[in-house]
Amino acid sequence: MKIFNANKDETLVFALGGLGEVGKNMYAIMHNDELIILDAGVMFPKDELMGIDYVIPDFTFLKKNEDKIKALFITHGHEDHIGSIPYFLKQINVPIYATKLTIGLIKNKLEEHKILRSSKLLEVMQGETITLGKKFKVEFIRSTHSIPDSVMLAIKTPVGTILHTGDFKVDYTPIDGKIMDFGRIAE
């Protein structure tokens, strides 16, 4: 895998899974010596992969740049966005930021893998902004999807704001009564 060398004015955005495929969602944003990760999911195998339970993203690039990783941010609790977290944390242990329901689902996975105690899970509220290092501010914007407590992420970088939608469904009557924050997304 090619290792990127960005100059000081570039922000790199790249997929480690989930692009052009269903599942295995994992994206990275890097500016100089700081890197954040968005989602860490699995893909369920096709019929020709008999005996394989899950397909996980390739963590090689992240392992080589482990010292740059500030955190992992999760958009929602579906398997294609949280399923590879235990496998990732066994190689690279970083703080995880997610909403309450998503944290609960992640805790169950980490407990199954016996790594809950060594993991740092940080619960955030929709609307909250987290500042990491010198390069990133990540805002959790209320979204709607087929699972409650979903968020979009507005990532402020030195070169502009990136809106990472994760999966979403425009729903004017969500079961929890909390509609997508269209005003904030437009901003």
Image: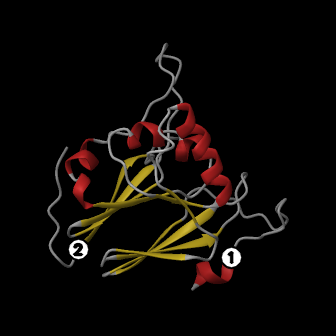
Name the residue furthest top.
51
At 42% from the left and 36% from the top, the residue drawn is 87
Name the residue furthest front.
117
Q: Label 1: few (<14), some or many (≥20) within 10 Å?
A: some
At 78% from the left and 69% from the top, the residue drawn is 178
Q: Label 2, on which residue? A: 10
Q: Label 2: few (<14), some or many (≥20) within 10 Å?
A: some
Measured along the vertical axis of the image, is residue 3 above or below residue 134?
Answer: above
Left or right: residue 12 versus residue 150 is left
Left or right: residue 59 versus residue 10 is right
What amino acid does circle 1 point to? Answer: Asp
Quadrant showing the N terminus: top left
Measured along the vertical axis of the image, is residue 22 above or below residue 46?
Answer: below
Left or right: residue 134 versus residue 74 is left
Image x and y of residue 29, in percent = 34, 63
- First-in-chain label (1 vs 2): 2
Measured along the vertical axis of the image, is residue 141 above or below residue 147?
Answer: below
**Alpha carbon distance from label 1 to label 2:** 29 Å
What amino acid does circle 2 point to? Answer: Glu
Q: Label 1, on which residue? A: 181
Image x and y of residue 67, in percent = 23, 57
At 52% from the left and 68% from the top, the residue drawn is 153
Check disc 2 and report its element: helix, strand or loop.
Answer: loop
Image x and y of residue 95, in percent = 43, 57
Image x and y of residue 171, in percent = 78, 63
At 70% from the left and 57% from the top, the residue drawn is 145
Quadrant showing the C terminus: bottom right
